[in-house]
Image (cartoon, rainbow, N blue to C red):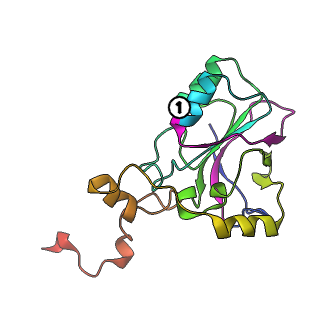
Amino acid sequence: MAVERSRRRKHFPHTRAALRPLVADDDDIAVLVVPLFDGEQAAFEAVEKRDYKEGDVIVIRYEGPKGGPGMREMLSTTAALYGQGVENIALITDGRFSGATRGLCVGHVGPEAMDGGPIGLIRDGDVISIDAVNGTIEVALSDSELAARAKTWKARTTDYQSGAIWKYAQTVGSARDGAVTHPGGAKETHCYADI
């Protein structure tokens, strides 16, 4: 399965994502309406009830390294859609997918919703265009509307407000940089392996 980095785009200028290419030949550009979910469990419950329609792009946010916390896999939702025989639908998430994922899926979107990334500004009913050939995603909103949404945006409160998982969420970096909890070897001033 080939995975490509998406290119910069007008409305999401700092967004990076892993794009699972379309399987179909003639669906290179998909224009879809958003049903939005804060977390995979809510998306999975909607799919179980078939509370979506073909031609939608399901957006699952707050599943990135900080928002999850932990960036769990979106396999339950994608497997449920596949089991229902759905073909004309897409998924976008700041979480991750496995190799078993089918259809048009965009994962590892960053900056993630918990960091105020563009995926955090999307609302139910927004229209999104996904161009799998050129690796672009655009939302049909003006720059001024996106700026107004950014001003009122607030991060979601997770269920983890103390302990090890809370600590992880406070220190983890972006998925693009490996979701590590340290600044990397270049920042080290002393190597403890030399002791």
Q: Residue furthest front?
A: 152
Residue 118 percent location from the top left of the image: 67, 60
Quadrant in the picture for the C terminus: bottom left
In which image quadrant can residue 50 be found? top right
In which image quadrant can residue 141 be found? bottom right
The residue closer to the viewer here, 135 or 58, is 58
- Residue at the disc numbered 1: 75
The residue closer to the viewer here, 153 or 54, is 153
Residue 76 percent location from the top left of the image: 52, 29
Residue 103 percent location from the top left of the image: 69, 31
Q: Amino acid at mark 1?
A: Leu
The residue segment tinted magenta is 14-41
Q: Residue furthest top?
A: 84
Q: How many badges with numbers are in the image?
A: 1
Q: Residue furthest right?
A: 26
Q: Residue at x 35, y 67 (%)?
A: 182
Quadrant in the picture for the N terminus: top right
Q: Residue furthest left?
A: 195
Q: Residue at x 84, y 35 (%)?
A: 27
The residue closer to the viewer here, 152 or 34, is 152
Q: Secondary structure at mark 1?
A: helix
In which image quadrant can residue 14 be found? bottom right
As drawn, 123 above or below 28: below
* Left or right: 58, with 96 as reference point: right
As drawn, 1 above or below 70: above
Q: Is 170 part of what is drawn in magenta?
A: no
Q: Is 19 part of what is drawn in magenta?
A: yes
Q: Residue at x 17, y 73 (%)?
A: 194
Residue 72 percent location from the top left of the image: 46, 42
Q: Residues within 10 Å of mark 1 (few under 14, many from 20)?
A: some
